[in-house]
Image: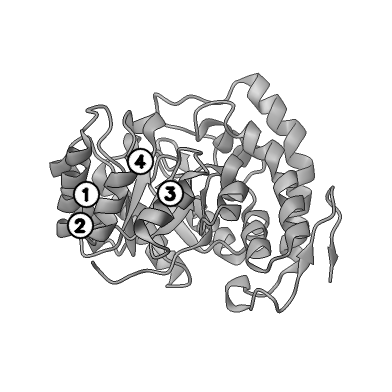
Amino acid sequence: MTARLSLGGSMTALITPFRNGAADEAAFIRLCERQIARGTTALIICGSTGEAAAMQPEEQAALVALAVATATRRVPVVAGCQAPATEAAVALANLLMRAGADALLCAPTPYVKPTQQGIICHMRALAHAADRPLVLYDVPSRVGVGIADATVATLFKRGIIHAIKDATADVSRVARLRALCGAELAQFSGDDATAAAYRAAGGGGCISVTANLTPALCSLLHRSWDAVDLRAFANTCDLLAPLHEALFLESNPIPLKAALGMLDLAPNELRLPLTRASQPTRDRLAGVLPAVMDAEDGLATMLPYNWRRESHRTRSFRIPRGSSFTTV
């Protein structure tokens, strides 16, 4: 296996901001800096939230290189590496590796519905092509086929994967995979709505869509669990729940980009076949965003230091129900 990489906590599946059809590099840099300043532990670039399926490989590599240059090793940069066939995925992996990605997020090929043996062969080819840790991405709703527990165990025991991003929302799977692979397999949720339950079941973090909007609150959720501050953990979970729901009223990242546009954080522009959010979705977002963003910005204002360099127990932050804050 390639050198292991420390990942965990709140990691953001970052959008790709577009302006007039091209990647908006200035907006992208601002988004990366906001994430890092507010406690995000890793940037996930050009995944499904980043609309990688609508981008050319060279565009993806350029964006990964920009993220690497912006992060300046403050947080790892993980690059999505999905393609319709293994040969194309291997070529993309080489581009992303040269762009400086610290790890690759790899799902099975979409549409073709490979067998479990085909998934193993695909991941093995990627591992051989790229001298980077692989994070296996199990997202059957997009790929069309799920990854069996036994397949995950085979990939891990053969040193092909370092971690798994599990977007199945099956919280009980954490224990099953731990029984098969041991605690060394890093397990991350890919479903914001069940991320808190996933941590409670033994998972190590979440690769989050919601954290595009609320990186400080999402980071607090995981820090609270690590600090055994169950009150802050539960209250943060309750505060974020309506936003999680609103962000998946339509295909991701349609509602997310609408919300970012409403907050002037990024252009509300997508590439076809994705279209802008419907009015009912925008109305729901308009109802949810004020309270949660008041809490997000208030928390960020209270945290001028770099969370990642502070002990979990140096200072405890509690969120009562609602948007007011106290510190203890």
Residue sitting at the far front: 179
The reply, left or right, for residue 32 in relation to residue 148 is: right
The kind of residue tagged 4 is Ala
Q: Which dot marks residue 127?
A: 2
Distance of mark 4 from mark 2, alpha carbons?
20 Å
Rendered image quadrant of residue 246: top right
Q: Name the front one of labels 4 and 3.
A: 3
Tell me the residue that label 4 is attached to. 52
In the image, residue 169 sits, relative to residue 132, either above or below, namely above
Of the numbered discs 1 and 4, the one sitting upstream in the chain is 4
Q: Residue at x 17, y 39 (%)?
A: 118
Q: Secondary structure at mark 2?
A: helix
Of the numbered discs 2 and 3, the one sitting upstream in the chain is 2
Q: Secondary structure at mark 4?
A: helix
Within-10-Å neighbours for mark 2: few <14, some 14–19, many 20+? many
Tell me the residue that label 1 is attached to. 123
Q: Position of residue 147 (x, y in %)?
A: 32, 39
Within-10-Å neighbours for mark 4: few <14, some 14–19, many 20+? many
